[in-house]
Image (tube, helix red, strand yellow):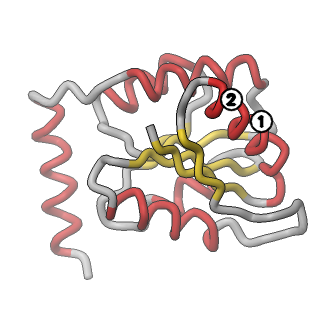
Amino acid sequence: MKILISCDHRGTTLRDKIVDWCVSKGHEPVNMGPTDSSSVDYPAYAIPLAERVVASSGAEIGVLICGWGNGMAIAANKVKGARAALCMDRVQAEYARRHNDANILVLSAEATGFGMIEEILTAFLAEKFEGGRHQRRLDFIASYEKKCK
């Protein structure tokens, strides 16, 4: 699976570990920056990743990392069609995919240890969207997005 990965300056160390983890699991990680740990503005990395995930129509999954995760989630979710979910444990990751059809996983570099990150990634990549009543809710969101310009 192709996995797009980006972060802000506080997430570069974790991002590099995740890139290595993806390779070890047979995935194709795409590092979308930044190149070092110099201070950057997270929207400059969250928005391009979200745009690419949405444009790929499900062919690519995104992973965003910042200090606590909220900034990346907020910025990514401004992109029409992006469903970025901040997940702090495996169960959140499972439900983000199963019920919300999340296409971007957001992680906290400060609050989550790498052992838990591995569990979260494994769950997020393994789960599939259930559809059914959950599709109705996503359709509601998509309908609202169409009204917003």
Tell me how many marks there are.
2
Image point 67% across, 48% down: which residue?
65
Q: Is mark 1 in CB contact (under 8 Å) with mark 2? A: yes
Amino acid type of the residue that numbered disc 2 sits on in the rendered structure = Trp
Residue highlighted by disc 2? 21
Circle 1 packing at 10 Å, graded few (<14), some (14-19), many (20+), is few
Q: Secondary structure at mark 2?
A: helix
- Packing grade of label 2 (10 A; few <14, some 14-19, many >=20) is some
Give the residue at the far right of this rendering. Answer: 38
Amino acid type, mark 1: Lys
- Give the Cα distance between marks 1 and 2: 6 Å
Query: Residue 5: x and y, percent?
Result: 61, 50
Residue 100: image quadrant is top left
The residue labelled by disc 1 is 17
Residue 24, horizontal then vertical, whole percent: 66, 25
Q: Position of residue 73 (x, y in %)?
A: 54, 53
